[in-house]
Structure formats: structure tokens, C-alpha cells
């Protein structure tokens, strides 16, 4: 009878140990199944969807090499509260690492607190959180790019075109009338892309006149509506449109097409991201240029870092800067090199 009680106690202690271990693994543990959680601010975002297509390709290739990998992807539908609940659910499901595309870059505190308590590393990606928040815990990382760099390149593309083609200055007044379509109010990428694009144009010696700006929340449909309103109000003198992403540039193009304004009478339009649709618009001549945001490179870096963290592999070789960041460079895309990116 005494032996039976001892066995029962040992079994109970073993069960409790398993329950409370959660997502914690020691360096000597062997991870046989890899569970990666992903939550997206909006699964319908074009660029983000294409980044995840690339991410899934790396997962598929890894499975072919014999790795047992489960990836759970959630759509936060632009709700930070919903995203917080998703992270909680992924932690409880035993994910060893979670990749977070933040809804609100200024409000990651609940996610960070939950992850720290469960000892589950978090990789934020594509939507950069405030630096001080990333420094709260050593197991927080970011994969993305420098937003200001894309703004500079967008401004350079426009400056080069304006100097090369005097027809862009349609009214011949020596001043470029421009409109900015911004992604999101208060969003770091939107602010930096806008600021650096315009500043770069000015620094190149181009005289400019801001005709206006519109917030379109990264949306093609919203951008179309805002530009259509501008056209209807008699905005015929517009010469350049800077859009914070390709989707909004495409929305501007849609507005001009719907208004039956021929290509030669439209402003030149620039995007950022290099989505498949954006590149095709460049080929057709509807978009003057875009800045390629390396979705394949970001997807590869995101997967490799997640895999190494999940399997407790040394991450010193994954290209981290300041032990926190992986940033991929932007590149300029014009009609001269667009087919390289379409391949």
C-alpha cells in the first residue's frame, strides 16, 4: 500500500512538471516538433500576403528536409486586443516562438509581458515597434527594413525623372506640384517615407509645391477614393504623386483610369514595396517607379531566426544588429530593371 502511494505521488509530480513547463526548454532538450505562431495585423494587406507566401515556401522546403514543423497563422483584423488574445492562445498551444506583425506599434506591452512570463521569444516583423519596447527583454527581435531608406530612394527616383524629362512639369512653371498619399496616421513607416521622399526631392534642387496629402491606411480602395475626390475638385495641375506603398499608388492609378484621363495627362506616380501588382503597373507605364522592399529576404530571415530560436540553436550567425535587429536593404525599381524583379 505504501509503495502504491509513492508511485501515485511520483506520477502526480511528473504530471505537474509537464503542465508547468509550458514553452520552456533547456539547452539540452531535444525539440522533435517545431511550433511557430504568426499573427498578422491584416491578412489582406498585399505586401504582407506576398511576404507570407515566401515564408511558407521556406517552411515547405524545411519540411522536405525532414523537419516536423507546424505553423499557425492568425489574422488580427486591425485589432490590437484581438492580437493580444491570439498571442495568449499561441503560448498556451505550446508555440516555441511567435512572430508578430503588430497592429499598434506603440502598444506591444501586453504581448511582451505574456511572452516574458512564458519564456517564449517574440520576433516582431514588418511593422517596427518603438526601440525602448524592444529593449524590455533579451528575447525580443525585429525583422524588417529602415523606412527612411525607402523614402530617400522614392525621392531620388522622382528627382532623376524630373531632371531627365521636362514634360513632368506640365505647366512649365519650374515648380513640381505634388500630392502625398500616406499609409497611416502616426505610423513610423508612413511618417519617414513621406518626410524623406519630399526632403530628398528638395535636396536634389527641385522646387516643389505641396498640393495636399491624404491618409489612405495602406488601402488601394481608400487611395482611389481620395484621389478621385481630388480629381473631381479640379486638381488638374498635379504633377507627382508619392504613395507610401504600391497598393495606394495603384489606387491613384485606378482613380485616373476611372476618370478617363489619358496617361500623358496624369501625374507621375511612385510607390514603395515592389509587389507583383506594383511591378506590373510599372511595366504597363502606369507607375513611374517603386522601391523594392525585399519580402523574400525578410521572409527568409524571419523563418531562419524563428527556427533557430525554436530549436535553441546559436543565433549569432543570423545577421543580427545590436543583438536585436535584422534589416534588409531596399532597392530602386524602374522600367529599366523591373523584369529582374518580376523573375
Image: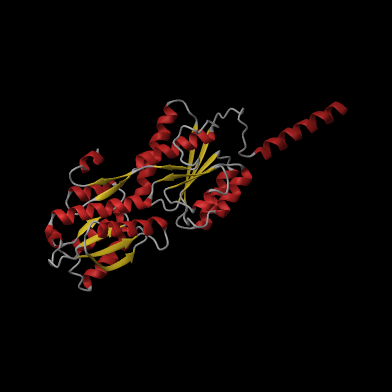
Q: Nearer the viewer, residue 193 or 56?
A: 193
Res 6 quadrant in image: top right
Q: Nearer the viewer, residue 209 or 227?
A: 209
**Percent x, y of residue 161:** 18, 54
**Quarter of the image with the N terminus in it:** top right
Q: Residue at x 39, y 46 (%)?
A: 145
**Percent x, y of residue 87:** 54, 48
Q: Nearer the viewer, residue 255 or 179?
A: 179
Outermost residue to the bottom? 233
Q: Residue at x 29, y 66 (%)?
A: 226
**Percent x, y of residue 18:** 68, 35
**Percent x, y of residue 230:** 25, 69
In screen coordinates, is 269 left or right of 116? left
In screen coordinates, is 46 left or right of 236? right
Number of marks drawn:
0
Q: Residue at x 37, y 57 (%)?
A: 192
Amino acid at each position: 500500500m505504501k509503495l502504491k502511494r509513492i508511485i501515485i505521488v511520483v506520477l502526480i509530480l511528473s504530471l505537474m512538471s509537464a503542465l508547468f513547463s509550458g514553452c520552456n526548454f533547456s539547452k539540452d532538450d531535444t525539440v522533435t516538433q517545431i511550433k511557430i505562431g504568426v499573427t498578422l495585423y491584416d491578412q489582406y494587406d498585399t505586401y504582407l500576403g506576398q511576404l507570407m507566401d515566401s515564408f511558407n515556401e521556406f517552411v515547405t522546403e524545411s519540411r522536405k528536409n525532414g523537419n516536423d514543423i507546424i505553423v499557425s497563422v492568425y489574422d488580427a483584423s486591425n485589432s490590437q486586443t484581438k492580437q493580444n488574445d491570439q498571442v495568449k492562445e499561441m503560448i498556451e498551444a505550446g508555440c516555441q516562438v511567435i512572430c508578430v506583425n503588430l497592429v499598434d506599434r506603440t502598444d506591444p506591452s501586453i504581448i511582451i509581458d505574456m511572452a516574458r512570463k512564458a519564456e517564449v521569444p517574440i520576433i516582431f516583423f514588418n511593422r517596427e515597434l518603438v526601440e525602448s519596447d524592444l529593449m524590455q527583454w533579451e528575447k525580443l527581435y525585429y525583422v524588417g527594413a529602415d523606412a527612411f531608406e525607402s523614402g530617400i530612394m522614392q525621392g531620388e527616383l522622382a528627382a532623376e525623372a524630373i531632371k531627365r524629362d521636362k514634360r513632368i512639369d506640365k505647366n512649365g512653371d519650374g515648380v513640381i506640384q505634388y500630392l502625398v498619399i500616406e499609409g497611416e496616421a502616426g505610423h513610423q513607416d508612413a511618417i519617414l517615407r513621406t518626410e524623406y521622399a519630399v526632403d530628398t526631392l528638395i535636396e536634389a534642387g527641385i522646387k516643389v509645391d505641396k498640393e495636399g496629402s491624404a491618409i489612405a491606411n495602406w488601402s488601394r480602395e481608400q487611395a482611389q477614393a481620395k484621389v478621385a475626390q481630388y480629381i473631381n475638385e479640379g486638381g488638374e495641375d498635379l504633377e507627382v504623386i508619392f504613395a507610401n506603398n504600391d497598393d495606394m499608388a495603384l489606387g491613384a492609378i485606378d482613380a485616373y483610369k476611372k476618370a478617363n484621363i489619358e496617361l500623358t495627362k496624369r501625374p507621375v506616380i511612385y510607390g514603395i514595396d515592389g509587389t507583383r501588382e506594383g511591378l506590373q503597373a510599372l511595366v504597363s507605364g502606369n507607375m513611374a517607379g517603386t522601391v523594392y522592399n525585399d519580402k523574400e529576404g525578410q521572409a527568409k530571415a524571419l523563418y531562419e531566426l524563428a527556427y533557430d530560436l525554436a530549436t535553441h540553436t546559436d543565433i549569432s550567425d543570423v545577421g543580427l544588429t545590436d543583438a536585436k535587429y535584422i534589416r534588409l536593404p531596399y532597392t530602386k525599381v524602374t522600367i529599366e530593371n523591373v523584369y529582374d524583379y518580376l523573375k
